[in-house]
Image (cartoon, helix red, strand yellow):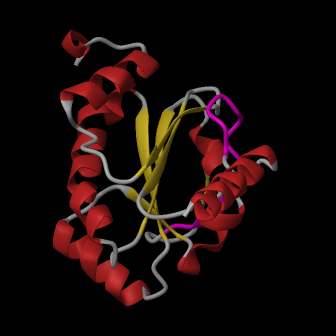
């Protein structure tokens, strides 16, 4: 048992030392993907906004559960300069379109079938996985797993990044 724990710890240390995990404070890597609504979207065009970049899939129950809170978050803080960008790793575009229509999502949805960009560029290890990127393009938060994005705690954190108060709605 001790050998297994030591091997797992060693692997994690090796992965971190080789730079597999994106570090909070580092520049967000470039990202250009097809948008579900058509055309392509370049993350660089979001410079000057706070971006909540979420990697997810329709077959992932925690992803599906957190999607309504991401939608509400953008409705709450979009006018203040926040943008939610949801990168779907679904391979089945029809299933994705059906889900988006059923949920009445208005978020910007990008497509990364199979999660190649998610894994190779953002080093995503599971879904959902989210990066909060500040106005200068730096990663400020990295969240592995689901979150309630429109909770009082997250709204407060994101308002602080945006430089707005709760009263300035």
Residue sitting at x 60%, y 64%? 4
Taking 47 as reference, is 136 above or below it? Answer: above
Side of 41 where 101 appears, left or right: left
Would you say residue 21 is visible in this rendering?
yes
| Residue 149, x across and y down, in percent | 28, 41
* Figure quadrant of residue 107: bottom left
Q: 51 or 64, which is in the foreground?
A: 64
Q: Residue at x 46, y 54 (%)?
A: 129
From the viewer's perspective, tell me whether residue 85 is left or right of residue 31. Answer: left
Quarter of the rendering occupied by the N terminus? bottom right
Which quadrant would the C terminus be assigned to in this image? top left
Q: Measuring 57% from the left and 27% from the top, which residue is drawn there?
A: 135
45 and 135: which is toward the camera: 135
Tell me the chief SS of the magenta region.
loop
In this rendering, would 136 be left or right of 59? right
Q: Position of residue 62 (x, y in %)?
A: 28, 63
What residue range appears in magenta? 22-35
Q: Position of residue 153 (x, y in %)?
A: 26, 26
Kindly give the residue lying farthest to the front in the view shown.
Answer: 2
Q: Is residue 26 magenta?
A: yes
* Position above or below: 91 against 7: below
Instruction: Inspect this view and state whether residue 30 appears.
Output: no
Task: Give how far across and how far down residue 87 sits, in percent.
Answer: 48, 62
Q: Is 147 located above or below residue 49 in the figure?
A: below
């Amino acid at each position: 048992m001790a050998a297994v724990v030591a091997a797992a710890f060693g692997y994690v240390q090796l992965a971190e030392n080789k730079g597999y995990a994106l570090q909070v404070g580092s520049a967000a890597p470039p990202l250009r993907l097809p948008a579900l609504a058509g055309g392509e979207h370049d993350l660089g065009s979001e410079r000057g906004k706070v971006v909540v970049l979420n990697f997810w899939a329709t077959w992932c129950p925690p992803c599906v559960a957190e999607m309504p809170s991401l939608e509400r978050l953008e409705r709450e803080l979009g006018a203040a300069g926040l943008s939610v960008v949801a990168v779907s790793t679904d391979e089945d575009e029809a299933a994705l379109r059906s889900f988006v229509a059923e949920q009445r999502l208005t978020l910007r949805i990008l497509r990364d079938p199979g999660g190649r960009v998610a894994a190779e560029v953002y080093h995503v290890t599971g879904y959902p996985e989210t990066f909060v990127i500040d106005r200068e393009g730096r990663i400020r938060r990295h969240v592995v797993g689901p979150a309630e994005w429109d909770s009082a705690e997250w709204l407060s954190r994101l308002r602080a990044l945006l430089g707005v108060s709760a009263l300035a709605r």
